[in-house]
Image (cartoon, helix red, strand yellow):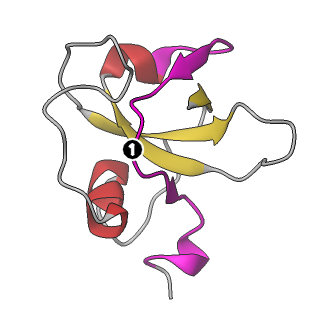
Amino acid sequence: MKVKNINGTSTITCKCGSRLNHWRNFSGQLLHSFCSEVTCMQSSEVGAHVQKDSATDKSWYIVPLCKEHNARTGDSINIIEGINLVSANVSVTCGK
């Protein structure tokens, strides 16, 4: 699946304490040792705000990435198949 990183979201917070914790709390998956980008061997360090690289789905999601891929703008990031995207909309997750 291809996603695009959404930059400028570092001030958005939730009850989980961090976006990576948010992903852990709502993904139903264990955190992988490596970044979710298919070829990256760096550690998953942050929960990144992303959008699917799709004309129809403009929702925001959280996915674990390394800091380098989290800082990437404009380009699509190909993430590992099977990684759950967690809604960044706290009204449907931790803000209930």
The residue positioned 52% from the left and 53% from the top of the image is 12
Q: Is residue 80 above or below residue 23?
A: above
Q: Is residue 29 above or below residue 79?
A: below
Judged from this view, the residue extending furthest toward the front is 81
Q: Secondary structure at mark 1?
A: loop
* Quadrant of the rendered image containing residue 87: bottom right
The residue positioned 44% from the left and 24% from the top of the image is 70
Q: Viewed as shown, does residue 54 lie left or right of 29?
A: right
Q: Position of residue 41 (x, y in %)?
A: 20, 13
Quick check: can you spot residue 7? no
Q: Nearer the viewer, residue 70 or 53?
A: 53
Within 10 Å of disc 1 (Cα), the crowding (few <14, some 14-19, many 20+) is few
Q: Is residue 77 magenta?
A: yes
Locate the N terminus by quadrant: top right
Q: Viewed as shown, does residue 95 lie left or right of 54?
A: left
Quick check: can you spot residue 59? yes
Query: Where does label 1 land, which residue?
Result: 82
The residue positioned 47% from the left and 48% from the top of the image is 62
| Three-letter residue code for mark 1 | Gly
Judged from this view, the residue extending furthest toward the bottom is 96
Q: Viewed as shown, does residue 2 lie left or right of 45?
A: right
Q: Is residue 49 above or below residue 19?
A: above
Q: Nearer the viewer, residue 53 or 25?
A: 53
The magenta stretch spans which residues? 71-94
> Chief secondary structure of the magenta span?
loop
Judged from this view, the residue extending furthest toward the left is 33
Q: Nearer the viewer, residue 92 or 57?
A: 57
* Quadrant of the rendered image containing residue 79: top left
The residue positioned 42% from the left and 43% from the top of the image is 63
Q: Is residue 58 magenta?
A: no
Q: Position of residue 30 (x, y in %)?
A: 17, 53
